[in-house]
Amino acid sequence: MFDVIFKNGTVFDGSGGHGEVRDVGVRDGRIEAIGALGEDASQLVECSGLTVAPGFIDIHTHSDATLLSDPDGYSLLMQGVTTEIIGNCGFSCAPCLKRELVERFMIGRLPGQAFTWSSFGEYLDVLQAQRPGLNVGAYVGHNTVRLNVVGNEPRGATDDELQYMGNIMRRSLEEGAIGVSSGLEYNPGFNSDLRELVEMAKVAKEFDAVYASHIRNRDWNYEMGLGEALATARLSQARLQLSHLAPKTGAPAHAAEHMLEMIEWTRQSGADVGFDVIPHEWGPTFLYTILPKWAYEGGVPAMLQRLADPDQRAALKNNTFPQWKLVAQKRWSELVLTRSAGNRELIGLDFAEIGRRRGVDPHDAILDILLEEGEAVADCTWAGRISEDQDIRLLMSQPGCAVISDAITLNTSGPLKDVQFAPTAFGWTARFLGHYARDLDMMDLGEGIRRLTSLPAQRMGLKARGSLQKGYHADVVVFDAHRISDRSSVQNMAKSPQGLLHVMVNGQFAVKDGSRTAVRAGQVLRR
């Protein structure tokens, strides 16, 4: 007898092929059989007219801290995601040797949330003890390792420090880290040079693990940012994953095409290069990235002193290379505040409106808000319309392009109910399958499902996941391919998609008949 049989659904196994009307039988947390299975099961789930697919995999999230505050996984589970990969863009919750620094820079950490572990393995143990609602794998972040060894000093690493950083990464990979990530637009990653990055990527190569990079630049100097990452892959021979690759506002019109040419040339030299995109023109980051790099020197206390000094305002605003060129172009209506402990009433408003309400220039309003955040300044975030849809579509049309959220796992209740981060947090899978794959007819359903399942599973080396096959873990999603659509927006991010009915994680229903169950059956996936 099966535990569950999904009856009469159009089954897509994740390989990219066409679907067939079949049954899927689940027993003891695994796929037991696919075919005409009768009705010998403890539970029958009628799926006529519906799509049955492997659970979706999000290989780029920042839920490292929010899963500790609320392990439910609501925002991802309600859109069919059964596995997420955290620790991206160089920031991971572990290792945690210089605890105050790591806590301060960690994305999504709620006030008062203490980091009680030291090693990467200890962090994974704590995460598993939380009983996450979905499966979680984690990168070890280069920025985090650098904070532990070099601190927040604006300089390159010494030979001894490089060796120490490499040993920390090795231990983290031995304890289960799924790969190594870097975030080179962020402090302290932007202080590293190619030599340092190659040494860190070589560690990933030792373990046949992925080196994922948020590259240094994707706009005015996109060739330099991408070229550095490709050189890192070529010199280290590590498997490179280029994170959220779409060119950003300010890049020339040909940037996306040129990026693909650069990647292809590097592949022809023997390097293994993959990439992914966010299925949205809007993306998230820290609000303090509006500041010039010198403003970070001395840490948060020194940053706050500079923000409070009227004589330094002009210098802080004269940032030749802001991370988002929307700032240089003064496109304030395309920049929205998403998280602020000191100004909750302004969350969801764009900075043109915030400036009007405060009666100041929008740039000054941003600096005022950063100052008002105080010691929590690193927790303040915004979203911007940073990419062009035509570039997203070009990159997405490539067969090896994975699709990601670049969000954090959130909820509509509990400690995370008032937290926002990115427009993709609640609806990215539906936006991809409904808007891009179906409505824009960019690819058929089978290929769209492959991009969310077997492609990311293979890229990350996830065993027995990402496909509906006998013996694979029973991560399953059931949805209406004609109705699935994203209902979230920049102004109202916390809306789950329509058209999704059931989500199973390791053989247990996390979502049933469109509603989240109380089950938390996720596993921490160690390399």
Image (cartoon, rainbow, N blue to C red):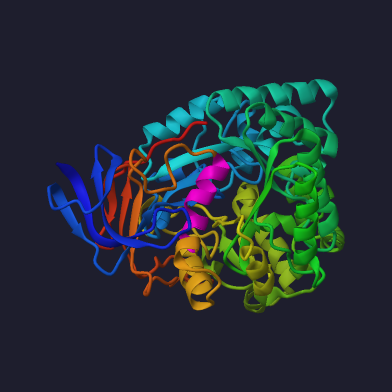
Query: Residue 75's quadrant in the figure?
Result: bottom left
Dominant secondary-structure state across the stretch colored magenta:
helix
Viewer-closest of 142 and 278: 278
Indicate yes or no whether the magenta region holds residue 225.
Answer: no
x%, y% of residue 226? 79, 52
Task: Give left or right: position of 344 versus 165.
Answer: left
Task: Give left or right: position of 10 versus 194.
Answer: left
| Picture residue at 79% right of the left edge, 59% below the top | 261
Indicate yes or no whether the magenta region holds residue 452.
Answer: yes
Q: In this view, does 14 lie above or below 523?
A: below
Q: In this view, does 97 lie above or below 27?
A: above
Where does the N terminus fall, quadrant-wise?
top left
**Total residue callouts:** 0
x%, y% of residue 351? 66, 72
Query: Residue 365's quadrant in the figure?
Result: bottom right
Tell me if residue 4 can be seen. yes
Viewer-closest of 59 and 496: 59
x%, y% of residue 264? 76, 54
Span highlighted in magenta in the image:
448-460
| Picture residue at 56% right of the left edge, 24% below the top | 119
x%, y% of residue 270? 76, 41
Q: Is residue 407 above or below residue 151?
A: below
Tell me if residue 110 can be seen. no
